[in-house]
Amino acid sequence: MGSLILGVEAMAFLEKEGFPVLRSFLATSEDDAAGKAAEIGFPVTLKLSSPDVIHKTEADGIRVSLRDESEVRQGFRQIVGTFTTDQPEKRLDGVMVQAQGGGVEVIVGMATDEQFGPVLMFGLGGIFVEAMKDVSFRLIPMEACDAKDMMEELKGYQVLESPRSGSVDLPAVQRLLLGISEFITRHPEIREMDLNPVFVSSHGARICDARIMVL
C-alpha cells in the first residue's frame, strides 16, 4: 500500500523538482489566510485541505477570484464552517491559499500498467475531459515528438491552438509533458500522478492541483 501526497505538500514537492506551480500556502486560521493572501497578491483562490477529501468542489471547498482581505476571511469561514458541519468525522488540515490561475485548463495524469509500465495521459480539462473523454496516451519514457503528437491528437486541439482567451504557449505544454516523463523515469516509486487542472496561457503552464501516489 502506497502513500498519497496531496495539496500544499504535493505542490511543494513538484516545485522542488522544477515544475511550474501556482504559488500556494496552507492556512490554519482566518488571520493566517488573510496574511498569506496578501503575501501572494490578489486575486487568490481558497481550497479545502483535507487528506480525506479528493474532490474539493463536491465538498463546497473552493472559492475563486477573491479580491481582498474581507473576501478571503469570508471564504475561509465558509469553507471551514461547511466542512466541519457536513463532514465532522473527516480530518481538516486547513485551507490552501493559492494564486489565481488563468487560461485553458488541461489535465496530465500518469498511471502504472502492470504489463506496459508507466503511461502518461494528457487531455483538455473541464467539460472536455468529463463529457468528451478527450485524452491521449503514451508510454513513458517519451520523445519530444510524442509530446507534440499527444497534443495534436486531441479532438479539441483547436482550443489549445486558437483559444478564445488568447494565445497558449504550446512549447511550454510540450516541456511539461516531457518533464513529467523524465521525472517518472527517475522516480519509479511514483505509481500514479494526477495534475488537474493545469492552466496554460501565453505565460506558460502552471500546475494548480496535484495528487501523487508513492510506493
Image (cartoon, helix red, strand yellow):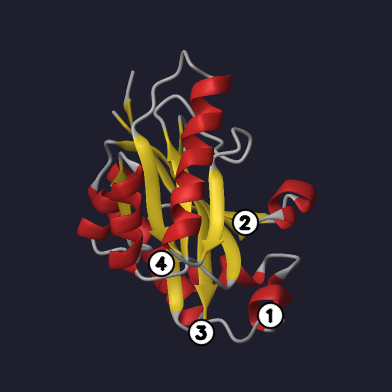
Q: Tell me which numbered mark, 1 or 2, is placed earlier along the sequence.
A: 2
Q: Quadrant of residue 102?
A: bottom right
Q: Amino acid at mark 1?
A: Pro
Q: Tell me which numbered mark, 4 or 1, is placed earlier along the sequence.
A: 1
Q: Tell me which numbered mark, 4 or 3, is placed earlier along the sequence.
A: 4
- Dot in front, 3 or 2: 3
Residue 64: x %, y % from top left: 55, 57
Q: Pointer 1 and pointer 3: residues touching (CB < 8 Å)?
A: no
Q: Tell me which numbered mark, 2 or 4, is placed earlier along the sequence.
A: 2
Residue at image mark 2: 136
Q: Residues within 10 Å of mark 3 (few under 14, many from 20)?
A: some
Q: Secondary structure at mark 2?
A: strand
- Dot in front, 1 or 2: 1
Q: Amino acid at mark 2?
A: Ser
Q: Tell me which numbered mark, 3 or 2, is placed earlier along the sequence.
A: 2
Residue at image mark 4: 176
* C-alpha gap between disc 1 and disc 3: 10 Å
Q: Which residue shows up at 36% across the image and 36% down it?
A: 94
* C-alpha gap between disc 1 and disc 2: 19 Å
Residue at image mark 1: 163
Instruction: Name the residue nearer the viewer: 55 or 84.
Output: 84
Q: Which residue shows up at 34% across the image and 50% down it?
A: 33
* C-alpha gap between disc 4 and disc 3: 14 Å
Residue at image mark 3: 202
Q: Quick one: which residue is furthest to the left in this view?
A: 16
* C-alpha gap between disc 3 and disc 2: 23 Å
Q: Residues within 10 Å of mark 4 (few under 14, many from 20)?
A: many
Instruction: Name the residue nearer the viewer: 133 or 55.
Output: 55
Q: Is residue 65 left or right of residue 94?
A: right
